[in-house]
Image (cartoon, rainbow, N blue to C red):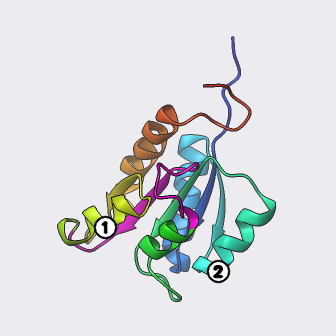
Amino acid sequence: MVAMTVPEVLLVEDSEFMSMRIIETLEDSHNMSLTAVGTAAEARDSLIDNTFDCIVVNYELPDETGVELADSLNPSGREPVVPIILLTGRELEPIAADAIEKGVTEFVYKGDHATANMDVLANRIRVVLKTHSLPGESN
């Protein structure tokens, strides 16, 4: 039996409640390892010394939008090295094209009951990881 690699996820979420809920659900129920930060600047700092398989970022952050963060992490305009999932409570249509162009891989709509979508988020993480090689694996 081959051991499954535990996905390393960087969570960029300014709401402490949402961060705690996401971490609790994804680590306990979905066998993922999360590192949480609250701002885009903290995310960039975390990426200097750490390697992540996926980044989950809230659209609205205190210092910039999640799309702006994705753009800064993807200056080439090509498919990002690390998949980026955007969490948003906003209507997707007005932001989707720009977000994809700037490096967002996938979206999860928070809706009015944000914590109810944790299984959807876990599924989206697994889907994007299947289309990207995990560090240390060959294509």
Task: Assess whether residue 85 is covered by the magenta stretch.
Answer: yes
- Chain-order first, disc 2 or disc 1: 2
**Mark 2 and mark 1: Cα distance apart in space:** 21 Å
Badge nearest the viewer, 2 or 1: 1
Tag 2 and tag 1, C-beta contact below 8 Å: no
- Three-letter code, disc 1: Asp
Which type of secondary structure does the marked residue at label 2 adopt?
helix
Residue pushed farthest front? 76
The magenta segment: 73-91
- Three-letter code, disc 2: Ala
Q: Position of residue 92 (x, y in %)?
A: 23, 66
Q: Position of residue 21 (x, y in %)?
A: 51, 64
Which type of secondary structure does the marked residue at label 1 adopt?
helix
The residue sitting at 55% across, 71% down in the picture is 72
Q: Quadrant of residue 100?
A: bottom left
- Judge whether 124 appears above or below 36 on screen: above
- Disc on res. 98: 1
- Left or right for 8, reference 127: right
Work out which quarter of the rendered image holds the N terminus and state it.
Answer: top right
The residue sitting at 50% across, 80% down in the picture is 15
Around disc 2, counting alpha carbons within 10 Å, would you say few (fewer than 14), some (14 to 19), or many (20 or more)?
some
Viewer-nearest residue: 55 or 17: 55
Task: Assess whether residue 82 is covered by the magenta stretch.
Answer: yes
Q: Which residue is mark 2?
A: 41
The residue sitting at 73% across, 67% down in the picture is 46
- Left or right for 8, reference 98: right
Q: Position of residue 78 (x, y in %)?
A: 47, 51
